Amino acid sequence: MNATTRQPILMYDTTLRDGSQGEGVSFSLQDKINVTRRLAEMGIDFVEGGYPLSNEKDVAFFQQIRDIDLGGTKVCAFGMTRRRGMKAADDPGMKALVAAQTPCITLVGKTWDYHATEVLRVSLEENLAMIGESAEFLGRHSDVIYDAEHFFDGYNANPDYAIETLRAAAASGAKWMVLCDTNGGTLPEQIAAVTKTAIEKLADFDVRFGIHCHNDGDLATANSLAAVDAGALQVQGTINGIGERCGNADLVAVVSNLALKKSGYEVLGGRSLKHLTELSRYVYETANLQWRNGQPFVGQSAFAHKGGMHVHAINKAASTYEHIDPALVGNERRILISELSGRSNIAAVAEQHNIADDREAMDKILAEVVRLENEGFQFENAGASFDLLVKRVTGSFTPHFDTIKYRVVAGDRDSRSHTVFAEAIIKLMVGDVLWFDAAEGHGPVNALDAALRKALQGTYPCLTEMHLIDYKVRVVDSGAGTAASIRVNIESSDGNESWGTIGVSENIIEASYNALVDAVEYKLHKENVPQPVADADSNDQADLAESASAN
């Protein structure tokens, strides 16, 4: 391999099987198909779809995925070696793997002598036969990837036997030897040394090696990279590192490090990583998991800067506090606003308002941020509310409506449908026009949100695009008991952009409503929507509506 040639390192994704074993993770059949499509679009080389003997959903997945064009991505079925005392051709697990009709089959076998004798209750000779006969049988139908379970524990306990298990699979036609750190407790230097030795011990076979690491020591990424440097050509893991116990190697981090940090390697067929953050968040959403804000490369906080000294440096040379350009992985820089912020933070965020050179405005904004944070506000995840704060302080804010009053009734029960619901009634002034409306919802905030947008959508049609996507509540001062201030953060989206707003009050309904109002105002300001011309007829109709409701 010359200096300009890069060694391809193949990515094997097991999110749909190993990842689904993580606590709280579950994928529907359609989820599995959708995720497979997205992985293929990203350029993942292998996608493990599941264990076809375990459930009907996995059987249906393998049937349906055959008819979908995944480009160069290969789908793998996963299964165990044949049962003891049974021929491979008669084993139900073997039959199910063949029936999946995948181009690759991943066969997992026992490498640790202790595991074979104490868990499987088979002799070491029988374990070797189970591996070899299973690989030979499956190899008649598909390429076999042999996953050597507990390889590093097995090698430490009995290195000769651990190598014999690999040789049994290789002699029977397996194409890949994947070394598994199943307990996730091995150190990088041990991974490297043992991987190198295993490759040398099987030099007489035409096989390639891979690595499969769990993250129990928080070293799965480092261990995977160490194995690659030792000669492994395939890395197995999951998107975002989800999986059983502490999870698996995070392919997001592995791909990013191999493509952007280490020299001499190529991943994803040389494709750009600009959709990596999007893929990460798609998998989180599909698995119904919260994003990990501090996740390297793709986390919301991965390129977030809060300290004033840091932001001052970032404005002059981004590389001082950013190890890569966030755009390379589809992420973005965020400048956070808090009581720790200096003028550099304010200037960086407020640059779009053309006041970066206005020292007096900077001081006023910073003073207002400090004042509000003393009351419980935090603007790190409420950029839209901060944007409106800047407009208010600098006199460029024009409200699109004024709230006169609102009322929420929560906990009402519908005797016919046996459901509990909330009802919100709201009275607004839009220009010189009075609007009065009401709506029901699953809870008080849902009802308020519906009533607010119902009252405004006739005047501001663009609000039909907007919806609430996240709602969080936190007690600011728990020592005050039921009189404590409540912080509400709301995330809204219009399909093209998402934005965060905040409200703080001792009343959770008021805090929620203030955050909702900011969300609507931000949408209207970013769309440059003008205030409407007063309409006397609408005013009369609103008065009549309010009078009728009161009666």
Image: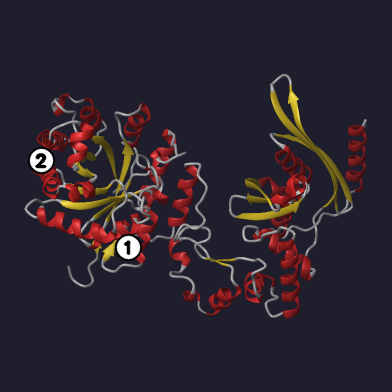
Task: Tell me the residue at 66%/76% (across/down).
Answer: 343
Whole-angstrom CA distance, mark 1 to mark 2, is 32 Å
Image quarter (top left, top right, bottom left or bottom right) of the C terminus: top right
- Is 167 on the left or on the right of 92, as rendered? left
Instruction: Please tell me the numbered disc located at residue 53.
Output: none
Classify 10 Å Cα crowding around label 2: few (below 14), some (14-19), many (20 and above): some
Q: Name the residue under label 1.
A: 258
Q: Quadrant of residue 26?
A: top left
- Is 527 on the left or on the right of 149, as rendered? right
Residue 461 drawn at (x, y percent) = 72, 48
Q: In which quarter of the image is residue 339?
A: bottom right
Residue 155, can we see it?
yes
Given residues 366 and 421, the one toward you in this image is 366
Task: Tell me the residue at 80%/69% (across/down).
Answer: 395
Classify 10 Å Cα crowding around label 1: few (below 14), some (14-19), many (20 and above): some
Q: Mark 2 points at which residue?
A: 172
Given residues 507 and 299, the one toward you in this image is 507
Which kind of residue does numbered mark 2 sit on?
A: Ser
Furthest toward the top, the residue is: 416
- Is 31 on the left or on the right of 538, as rendered? left
Q: Secondary structure beneath disc 1? A: helix
Residue 480 drawn at (x, y percent) = 74, 50
Image quarter (top left, top right, bottom left or bottom right) of the N terminus: bottom left
Q: Quadrant of residue 361?
A: bottom right
Which kind of residue does numbered mark 1 sit on?
A: Leu
Furthest toward the left, the residue is: 204
Task: Tell me the residue at 17%/52% (across/down).
Answer: 208
- Is 537 on the left or on the right of 252, as rendered? right
